Image (cartoon, rainbow, N blue to C red):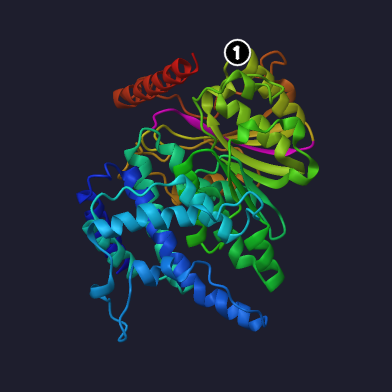
Amino acid sequence: MFEQTFKNIDDVLWKEAGCASELDYAEQTSWLLFLKYLEDLEPAREMEAQLEGARYQPLLEDKFRWTHWAAPKNAEGAFDHDNALTGDDLVDFVNRELFPYLQRFKQPDADPNTIEYKIGEIFSEIRPKFNSGYLLRDALELVDALEFKSQQQKHELSDLYETRIKNMGNAGRNGGEYYTPRALIRAMVKVTNPEIGETIYDGACGSAGFLCEAYDYLRPQVQSPKQLDFLQRRTFTGREKKSLAYILGVMNMILHGIEAPNIIHTNTLAINVDDIQPKDQHDIVLANPPFGGKERKEVQQNFPIKTGETAFLFLQHFIKSLKPGGRAAVVIKNTFLSNSDNASRSLRRRLLEDCQLTAILDCPAKTFLGAGVKTVVLFFEKGAPSKNIWYYQLDPGRSLGKTNPLNDDDLAEFIALEKTKADSERSWTIRAADLDPETCDLSVKNPNAPEADPIRDPADILDEIAALERETAEALTEIRALL
């Protein structure tokens, strides 16, 4: 039922001139879902207040509650068409009254970890794009059929929302910006193996895929109300710079069962790494930071190794954000392993000296749909220099694509072998002491692989050229903007 409802909502958005892309679809669906979620949250909050003997104050004033303006009901509980706003009246109410009211929830002195603050922040960052009040009315009636009252309903809706984010990532220029393949995330979570009581951080959280998958991994471990409270309120921290990704992340975590996600809307790289204190550090970092971007000179001053490459800045931030003994799994472009520029060499040396680089997962081309650039996953633990580095060269035995993406079975052998760091046709170990001390080159060179056919698939070559051209064009655009 929910899946068909989502398809029907898409049909409505497709007719709306203000919505021109999958990104618009995801954005507009998100604020509608969020307001319906708030309405379905009210009974649980009221019951909680009654149990504590407190007077209950609804989140929203009556005029702005879902059941008043979006889906009014008559005495029989049926939809009240006579009192439902529609047409220009509905658009005017949303644009001129509803959104300004919700934006006021973001007060400078408010607790950012409350659902009230999240309301204000979300509606300060998003804009309604419905020009037709009749199409908006159709969308509202469809969303009203969705319910968030049970865990099963939330789980089904979260799956559908994940699919929406995936489609948006596939349709956009930078698919990896919004959607990291969930099979890869699950493998990264399993290898880092978080436990209840540990804190998990993603400073480039996008749509919060890493935090959501980590929550799903930890939820079955909960054995007491105290543990559940820690999981809900203190385990996860995310930061995200871009408005749409921030909104998607908050909504995604809500659908996974976290009422007030601790996702902060900010530029993580604006934080000086010298200002990160022990209280700011975490047990686990899971992330796929954006690469190919260029940061301004003043931002680069926040880091000991100065570079415009955003992924390199994020890696420095993540190392500093780990507690001693903390562990991390971070996706990065494979050229990081071998680039000869000073920043790359210095960063590799810093990683090897400050952390035990335990494993490098070499991912195949097209792991990230829509991006032909090759990536690796770095697994490391903070607090001791690297000794032995285990490599695994992932080969699903097929060309990846939208119709046959990376799946859990593809990563099963990697997860199994990683526990013992065993050698195989696809895996091997090197000693950090054997690395060239000048370059610290970590290139993937499998000594156990059979002789490979030197002829590359032309389609792969074209994909990689196209991806590099996109990166170059985006970098030039950012440089022009700075001039």
> Outermost residue toward the bottom?
76
At which x and y percent is residue 189? Answer: 58, 50
Depth check: give the residue in front, 248 or 15.
15
Mark 1: which amino acid? Answer: Asp
Q: Where is residue 370, by image quadrant?
A: top left
Magenta region: which residues? 371-383
At which x and y percent is residue 140? Answer: 31, 63
| Residue 380 among those drawn in magenta | yes
Task: Please name the residue shown 64% across and 17% down the image.
Answer: 343
At which x and y percent is residue 467? Answer: 38, 25
In the picture shown, does residue 48 fall above or below 387?
Answer: below
Label 1 crowd bin: few (<14), some (14–19), many (20+), radius 10 Å: few
Depth check: give the residue in front, 22 or 213.
22
- Type of secondary structure dominating the magenta stretch: strand
At which x and y percent is residue 254? Answer: 51, 60
- Please say whether residue 224 is visible from this viewpoint: no
Badge count: 1
Which residue is tagged 1?
341
Q: Secondary structure at mark 1?
A: loop
In the picture shown, does residue 377 fall above or below 261?
Answer: above
